Image: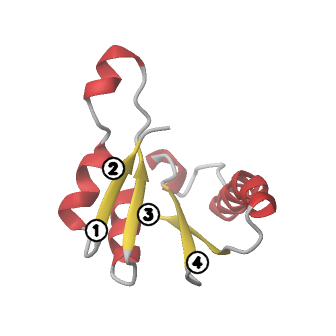
């Protein structure tokens, strides 16, 4: 039996440090809008394949560990992907994958692609 659940997809990003300087030519609102479009594009195929799953996009301009830790307060499970690349990547985890188990308020699953 399937259970009605909501999937919250957290897409967190941080602008380059120089983008926050007053003389910077970067438009943070436009960068955020572009990140929202990227997240929507990533999810489009999954939404078509699984239309019965209620998905909430949560795009945040914050460190990914902080975003996931905040989302974990209302989550049953936090799922984090591991982007291992090459032989060294197969045994090492990234900063988000290592950081979230220490800060999450719910169970964490690390999955490989």
Q: Provide residue 103's location: percent of width, then percent of height.
A: 22, 66
Disc number for residue 107: 1
Q: Secondary structure at mark 3?
A: loop
Visible residue check, residue 63: no
Q: Provide residue 76's location: percent of width, then percent of height.
A: 37, 77
Q: Say which residue appears at 54% left-offset and 58% top-offset.
A: 22
Q: Secondary structure at mark 4?
A: loop
Which residue is at the far front? 1
Label 2: which residue? 96
Q: Is residue 69 left or right of residue 16?
A: left
Cα gap from disc 4 to disc 2, whole angstroms:
30 Å
Q: Provide residue 93's location: percent of width, then percent of height.
A: 29, 37
Q: Provide residue 81's location: percent of width, then percent of height.
A: 44, 47
Label 3: which residue? 62
Number of residue marks? 4
Q: Answer with mark 4 or mark 3, whichever residue precedes in sequence.
A: 4
Q: Secondary structure at mark 1?
A: strand
Label 4: which residue? 2
């Amino acid at each position: 039996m399937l259970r009605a659940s909501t999937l919250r997809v957290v897409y967190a990003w941080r602008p380059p440090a120089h983008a926050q300087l007053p003389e910077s030519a970067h438009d943070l609102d436009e960068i955020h809008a572009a990140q929202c479009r990227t997240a929507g594009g990533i999810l489009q195929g999954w939404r078509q394949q699984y239309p019965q799953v209620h998905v909430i996009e949560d795009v945040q301009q914050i460190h990914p560990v902080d975003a996931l830790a905040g989302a974990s307060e209302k989550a049953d499970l936090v799922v984090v992907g591991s982007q291992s690349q090459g032989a060294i990547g197969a045994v090492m985890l990234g900063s988000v994958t290592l950081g979230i188990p220490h800060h999450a308020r719910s169970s964490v699953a690390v999955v490989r692609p």
